[in-house]
Amino acid sequence: MSGRRVGTGGVVRNEVAKLRHLRVGLVAGLMVLGMVALTLLSTLTSAVFADPARRSWDVPLAGLSLAVPLVCPLLLALVASRMVDVEHQGGGWLLNATSGTTPGVLCRAKLVTGAGVVVVVTAVTHLSVWALGRLAGIDAPVPVGLWLGFAAAGLAVNLVVLALHVVLSATVDNQLVALGTGLLGTVVAVFGSGFPAWSAHLTPWGYYSLVAAAGYEGQDLVRTSPSCFSVLVLTVTAAALFGLVTSRFDRQETR
Amino acid sequence: MDTVTTTGLTKSYGRQVVVQGLDLRVPEGCVYGFLGPNGSGKSTTMKMLLSLVRPTAGEVLVLGEPMNRSTRRRQLARIGSLIESPPGYGHLTGGENLRLVQRSLGLDEAQVDRAVRSVRLEEQLDKKVAHYSLGMKQRLGIAMALAREPRLLVLDEPTNGLDPAGIEEIRELLRRLAGRGVTVMVSSHLLGEVDKAADVFGILSAGRLLFQGSREQLFAAAVPDLLIDTSDPHRARAVLDDRVAARVDGGSLRIPGIDDQGTARVVADLVGAGAPVYGVRREEQSLEDVFMDLTRGGRL
Amino acid sequence: MTTPFSAALGAELTKLRRSLSWSVVVLLPVVVVLAGSFTTVVSGQQLADGWHTLWLRSVVFYGLLPLPLGLGILASLAWRPEHRGGSWNALMSSPVPSLYVVLAKTLVVALLGAVMQLVLLVTVVLTGKLLFGLAGMLPGRYLVITVLLVVAVLPVAGVQSALSMAVRSFATPVAVALVGAGTAAVLLAAELGGVVLVLPWAVTARATQLATGTFGDSGELTAGGAAAVVVAGALLTLLAVALATRYLERRDVHT
């Protein structure tokens, strides 16, 4: 064995290896299935969709805009909690620290790994909705720009929430806190669309309502444009905070 | 009367046989040392005695009554146990944990106090169990098992991870309990840890019982090597040559596994051939040697 | 030495000390009611039908997602201490009958669920009086519904407790709760009638919909609707407890 420190790539590869048996794939599948099913359901039951002449992409986009905040907060909490909990249980923090991987590095590697999962989930979900929309007979041209913006902004919010949960699970060795926060986040995310814009900016979960591509105002279906700037500010702030917190982990005594 | 009797006790997981055909006899009021290397099936056997695990075949009698899924809850009221890692809820204090046991078993205050005193845990009851040392956790686990004033106490590796003083304390406790008439079955992978406390031994290796009986029987079962002191061991070896497996060991001739008649014959032969014999003795053997001998070779 | 059942129940309550279970019990209903009220205030609308509208906005979503997930988290929390250290061996080596073990855990989870309903009721009343200045008191039928809700919590408590008993993981049963609650919501939305009540999560959700006029409810509190919830709830709870007890009696203790 060489005395060299394990490179970042090695740490991430280790994280991917740890994903085995954690059923993170199953949770990811559940996320895709949940979001696609909810979108499909809200589309097929929509009064707007019932009229073939008015069938537009706005209907599934509105459905997906609601499905994301319903499904993601809790399941992201679950993904992060499962990834981090193994370190609490098996004395993993200490084990990794003695081989040169500090807790902060470990958390960053976990975020990168989890982010990979979320990227795949996002891509599969959006592509599935598009394919099912085509199958359901939506012939209108795809609003590519809007959709890409929605997908990218939604992905960014999900990553921020994931990062928050990685830090939370690493700090508190009690899954109640992680899952309870995920559950409260779901409530905030779902009601977020009814909040005024300023208050939606206050918590990461509020941003789910800011990235919506379409939604219902009363009975009317309206297209909204995702607040990309707000999400950008959130992402940069979150990245800075995550870097700060994880580097503090590195300076702390090993737990 | 035997407190625990098993007949043909067997447990297999799929094709893997973990415990095979055990016939245990644990006499009343003794300390029974249940010995064997790690992974030899001690924990599984003890779990079957408590009906935590169902035997694939065979039967368990505890205190004269069958122990199985339909009788175990009644039986368990008379059995105290500590299996694998010590119990105790980390977020509660030692005292709170004991109150849980007291309430759920319907015990009175005095019973719990006695149990606490016998493991000397009085001073640590207000501490959260999560902050206990391993030794304190073991003692709390034993107190929980003792509080119900059991007739049989089953302890799985209670000395694991303890320091020598802690081990001595447990040994002393076991002797005291046996003195009060409690039958104690205690397992260990280290003979030295229960050696002085136990009167009866059961030795398990790879799921089979290699030996069961008293300390004297254990010594007798493993015949110590015969040492013949002679002024010319090489010549003596040449005399015996093919008939016995002898080898030169310093100034003596060492012959393993030879009985008394064999010994007499060998001495007669040596003297007949004119080899000067000035000493014939059995090698001093520690229980440790016997144990290692039995478990390594898997014989008997 | 016979063990009274009350002792087993008392022991369970002791184990919940310092477990933070109150945070779910209190925070979840309060946050849901406040989030619903906040969106109402922000929209500038009044509560169209006073107490009825406030109740509907507070309780229907709560019953679909937060309540079953909250119960799932509480069940995992109640079983968590047993999955650590040598507790399983100790629990199963005590003369306390398996039925008592299962029943005590289920009732403790249900008890926390019942307190949640009371918190919900109090929060709705306080919001109505203090935030909206509603005249009079919350109509009596909502008190009846709260009592029904306390009963309707039982089947979910039973099933989630059984899952958390059988599965060591904290998060997995909560994920099952999410799938169960999601399925129940979809089936309730499809307005299939009474058959939906074979799903425990649907019983709880249905109880929150009583007298709201949502999900095919008549808008009136009928004896038939109430009886359906109580009977289905009782049967499912008995079934869950019976199966869990059987499982506990038969299986080998694993560590």
Image: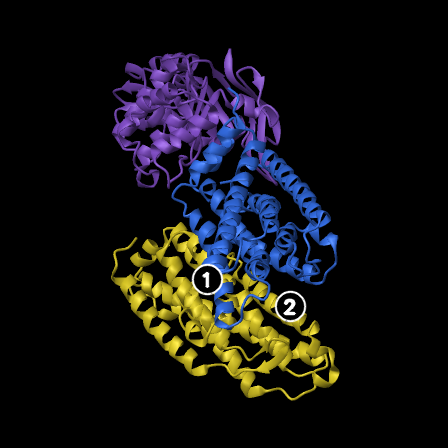
Chain colours: A yellow, B purple, C blue
Q: Residues within 10 Å of mark 2 (few under 14, many from 20)?
A: some
Q: Which mark is residue A37?
A: 2
Label 2: chain letter: A
Q: Amino acid at mark 1?
A: Leu
- Above or below, A148 against A76 in this view is below
Q: Quadrant of residue A103?
A: bottom left
Q: Residues within 10 Å of mark 1 (few under 14, many from 20)?
A: some
- Above or below, B255 against C255 in this view is above
Q: Percent position (x, y) of residue B167? A: 30, 28
- Above or below, A2 against A207 in this view is above
Residue topped by disc 1: C131
* Callout 1: SS: helix
Q: Residue at x 32, y 65 (%)?
A: A246
Q: Which mark is residue B189?
A: none
Q: Residue at x 51, y 60 (%)?
A: C134
Q: Would residue B110 appear left or right of C247 to someone viewing this image?
A: left
- Report whether residue B25 is seen: yes
Q: Percent position (x, y) of residue C1? A: 51, 19
Q: Amino acid at mark 2?
A: Ala
* Callout 2: SS: helix
Q: Nearer the viewer, residue A141 or A200?
A: A200
